[in-house]
Image (cartoon, rainbow, N blue to C red):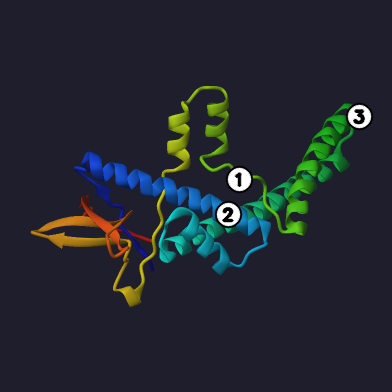
């Protein structure tokens, strides 16, 4: 059983907001970079992680998390491809059965047209499964991308949709999460965040932002 707690950062000052947004922007870019390298299949995971760290200034744990997030997207897309293929296969079978029972030529023509469209879509997903590929992924969402193309959202809004995530895993050997750590001081809860800024010893400068955690937990 997993326990999920949704927290909210509160009273975030201007400087902290800037650092958090910068961190999310860089991490999102690193995630997209890792995503593309995985699909190219020319580099090992270790090589990609080192390249991400060098290119984006992330520590190796952050680079591993960016790559893991990219892998999760690819895996979810492959599951979606399989589910979509199964769904269209069922629809093809249904229409074929209806076609066998159809009596009028007009009804048969309608069903044949629908069958042709369904088989085309079925074939698209079959080819992805056969070639171990996935449909094109648009970070930020296809619908939002279309809105941006139509000028319905600004370029700034589009970038916020693309660059609005940061993923960090905990580690037992590190006694928690070294990049995102919940701490309590003076009966107040804070989220300690490792920023992209470094001190003179090349260690990440951390900021502490007030964090609200609900009393009731969500169980999965």
Are the two marked residues, 1 and 3, in contact with CB atoms closer than 8 angstroms? no
> Disc 3 and disc 2: Cα gap in Å?
50 Å
Residue furthest to the top: 151
Graded by Cα atoms within 10 Å as few (under 14), some (14 to 19) or many (20 or more), the crowding at tag 1 reads few
Between 175 and 142, the one lying in front of the other is 175
Are the two marked residues, 2 and 1, in contact with CB atoms closer than 8 angstroms? yes
Question: Sequence-wise, which precedes: disc 2 or disc 1?
Answer: 2
**Residue on which disc 1 sits:** 137
**Which residue is found at the position 44% from the left and 43% from the top?**
163
Report if residue 172 is visible in the image: yes
Task: Single out the mark in the foreground, 1 or 3.
Answer: 1
75 left or right, relative to 211: right
Tell me the element at label 1.
loop
Q: Position of residue 84 (x, y in %)?
A: 67, 49
Graded by Cα atoms within 10 Å as few (under 14), some (14 to 19) or many (20 or more), the crowding at tag 2 reads many
Question: Sequence-wise, which precedes: disc 3 or disc 2?
Answer: 2
Residue furthest to the front: 200
Graded by Cα atoms within 10 Å as few (under 14), some (14 to 19) or many (20 or more), the crowding at tag 3 reads few
Between 209 and 103, the one lying in front of the other is 209
Question: Sequence-wise, which precedes: disc 1 or disc 3?
Answer: 3
Which quadrant is the C terminus positioned in?
A: bottom left
> Disc 2 and disc 1: Cα gap in Å?
10 Å
Report if residue 79 is visible in the image: no
**Residue on which disc 2 sits:** 35
196 left or right, relative to 183: right
Between 4 and 31, the one lying in front of the other is 31
Tell me the element at label 2.
helix
Disc sitting over residue 105 in the figure: 3
């Amino acid at each position: 059983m997993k326990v999920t707690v949704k927290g909210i950062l509160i009273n975030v000052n201007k400087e902290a907001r800037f650092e958090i947004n910068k961190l999310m922007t860089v991490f999102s870019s690193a995630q997209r970079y890792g995503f593309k390298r995985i699909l190219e299949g020319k580099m090992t995971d270790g090589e990609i992680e080192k390249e991400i760290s060098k290119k984006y200034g992330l520590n190796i744990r952050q680079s591993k998390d960016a790559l893991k997030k990219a892998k999760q997207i690819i895996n979810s897309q492959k599951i979606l491809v399989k589910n979509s293929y199964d769904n269209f296969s069922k629809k093809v079978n249904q229409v074929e059965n209806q076609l066998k029972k159809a009596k009028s030529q007009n009804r048969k023509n309608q069903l044949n047209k629908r069958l042709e469209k369904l088989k085309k879509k079925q074939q698209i997903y079959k080819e992805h499964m056969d070639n171990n590929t996935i449909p094109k992924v648009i970070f930020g969402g296809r619908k939002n991308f279309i809105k941006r193309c139509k000028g319905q959202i600004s370029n700034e809004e589009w970038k916020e949709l693309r660059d609005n995530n940061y993923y960090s895993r905990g580690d037992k050997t590190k006694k928690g999460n070294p990049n995102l750590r919940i701490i309590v001081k003076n009966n107040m809860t804070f989220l300690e965040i490792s920023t992209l800024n470094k001190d003179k010893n090349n260690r990440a400068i951390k900021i502490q932002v007030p964090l609200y955690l609900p009393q009731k937990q969500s169980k999965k």
